Image: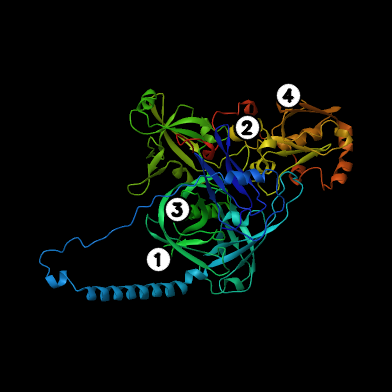
Amino acid sequence: MAVAVSNCYFSVLTSTVKFRSAVSAAQPSFAASLWSGSSCHTIKPVCQSNGAASNSRKGDKSRSEVKKEGVKKKLIGNGDVLSGGGGGKKGRSQQAAYKPFGTQRKEKKESVADQKEKKQAEVRNLQDADFLNAVVKVYCTHTAPDYSLPWQKQRQFTSTGSAFMIGDGKLLTNAHCVEHYTQVKVKRRGDDTKYVAKVLAKGVDCDIALLTVESEEFWKGAEPLHFGSLPHLQEAVTVVGYPLGGDTISVTKGVVSRIEVTSYAHGSSDLLGIQIDAAINPGNSGGPAFNDQGECIGVAFQVYRSEEAENIGYVIPTTVVSHFLNDYERNGKYTGFPCLGVMLQKLENPALRACLKVESVEGVLVRRVEPTCDAHNVLKEGDVIVSFDDVHVGCEGTVPFRSNERIAFRYLISQKFAGDVAELGIIRAGEFMKVKAELNPRVHLVPYHIDGGQPSYLIIAGLVFTPLSEPLIDEECDDSIGLKLLAKARYSLARFKGEQIVILSQVLANEVNIGYEDMSNQQVLKLNGTPIKNIHHLAHLVDSCKHKYLVFEFEDNYITVLEREGALASSTSILKDYGIPAERSSDLLEPYVDSVVDGQADQEDLGDSPVSNLEIGFDGLIWA
């Protein structure tokens, strides 16, 4: 994979694992650390960095210390496999059963020679294979936003990754390969010319990006790859790409180890993934994985790092790739994978099933429903979902998958598209019924990625307001954000589409804001008594204010009062002193449209459980 722009970590927050994303000054990469006992495990997209953003933030030392806390444990091998002749069959002659030592040695030599010749033939065939020529090297220049100073960007850096041709003048790679891109170039195998590529679509949740190259010279003699079906366990797999260690194409081989719903580190989502034991190294991101027939079975995108495990790499299967491409073709853009928007509890315990009047060994219990999803209108806490589109859901939250296999229930949801309707069979108070719910992408109160790339901001008399996001949390570090704000980010659900947690990021010192200079990273709740829905709403309230004073109410009952005319008059001098181009981001110049239904903003939003599967301490609860 190409170099990712940030590192994703899970850290402990009041006995809860926390997910966040950050920019590493040494080598930008996305990672997700899973804590188990005293060992530290990391799932990270593999990328090759040629440079790094120089904007290192406080707390980098603590991150490196966290990474070193893993406890070494030796893996116990299965031992040597002993194979023997077990006894000859009846009727075999003595000559056949017992051969002189010299004859056995000669036959062994011939066998080894045959194997070498066969292997050399395979190498020649692979070297001349057409599908290798469809794999290209990606050169990307990244310029990430500065979330603490949202009016500017960080220093640019470059990375390399892999991509491959899929026909119709398009290339496929990983989304983190072109995250925050300013320029993307590609180079074919055996060619010295780099061609400028255009990014057509990015799927952050599935970590896939679609590219195109307008130059006709690039496509001369090009043969696109053909997609294969989902492989089976122990099937051979070949990973091709341009990882570190050299400039030419690299080929590694292995087998399919596991197929299940997997955490995607870049998008913080759960989708179908293929686990393989073939080596995947920085720079392999976006490269294809092939079966023995030369068909592409997926896209290499991340690895699992642990002192307790080796050779664990992950491939995005063709089912996820096809969903991404079909979504783009349907809508002219990528809209994302939908979700049901419910938290589910497994029903393994017989007493729990009996209490809920569930007679069969099936179903999952609804424990929480997101207010922004359509299921909120048809499902209630305490309902038991026993089927999804007439597919029975087991008591462990799994459904049948191929022959003699089961897979997580949310796999069925990921097969749907945004706007599709699902039929749910539920048991409510002992009675079976069917309900329908429309599926749409999840609405995050605290987003993991910023749409458009640049965060929104508003400066009022030196007070810098911006929405809370995971990149901002990581950039500012936990200790400066505050426990209460972090708890909201981990446990709060959006009550309506467009809701944001707006915080006062910092105060640019000026005589108009004397006494407030030390304020930072505090949530602003109200302006002149009006609850703030999002950053655009705050800008609208300031622009339409006719009062003499601007009274900001913050978390912990702290208030800030500014004289309105003096605050507006000081804007020009503050912007000039700090070299800021504008008092607000360009998106806040658009007219404000209030889409909130009466009563939505009054609902309680803080729950007792985390809002992400990555932060739940055990597997008894799952977000669908």
Q: Residue 547 appears in which quarter of the rendering?
A: top right
CB within 8 Å, label 3 to label 1: no
Residue 378 visible in image: no
Label whose residue precedes the other's in the sequence (3 or 1):
3
Task: Describe the element under mark 1 as helix, strand or loop.
Answer: loop
> Residue 361: where, in percent of width, then height?
34, 32
Residue with the most extreme left position: 91
The image position of residue 35, as x and y in percent, is 52, 41
- State how far apart marks 1 and 4 are (Cα): 66 Å
Query: Would you call the spot at circle 1 few (<14 residues within 10 Å), some (14-19), or many (20 or more)?
Result: few
- Residue corresponding to mark 3: 274
CB within 8 Å, label 4 to label 2: no
Front position among marks 1 and 4: 4
Work out how far the residue at label 3 is from the one at label 1, CA to CA, in angstroms. Answer: 18 Å
Whether residue 489 is visible to the viewer of this picture, yes or no, is yes
Please tell me whether residue 503 is drawn above or below residue 298 in the rendered image. Answer: above
- Please report whichever mark, 4 or 3, sits nearer to the chain's N-terminal start: 3
Q: Secondary structure at mark 4?
A: helix
Task: Sort mark 3 into few (<14), some (14-19) or many (20+) by Cα contacts within 10 Å.
Answer: many
Q: Determine whether label 4 and label 3 are within 8 Å by CB.
A: no
Which image quarter: residue 562? top right
Q: CA distance from mark 4 to mark 2?
A: 16 Å
Q: Nearer the viewer, residue 119 or 589?
A: 119
Which numbered mark, 2 or 1, is in the foreground of this view?
2
The residue at which mark 1 appears reads as: 293
User: Which residue has dot 4 on it?
Assistant: 557
Amino acid type for the residue under numbered disc 3: Ile
Q: Which residue is mark 2?
A: 488
Q: Earlier in the sequence, mark 4 or mark 2?
A: 2
Give the residue type at disc 1.
Gln
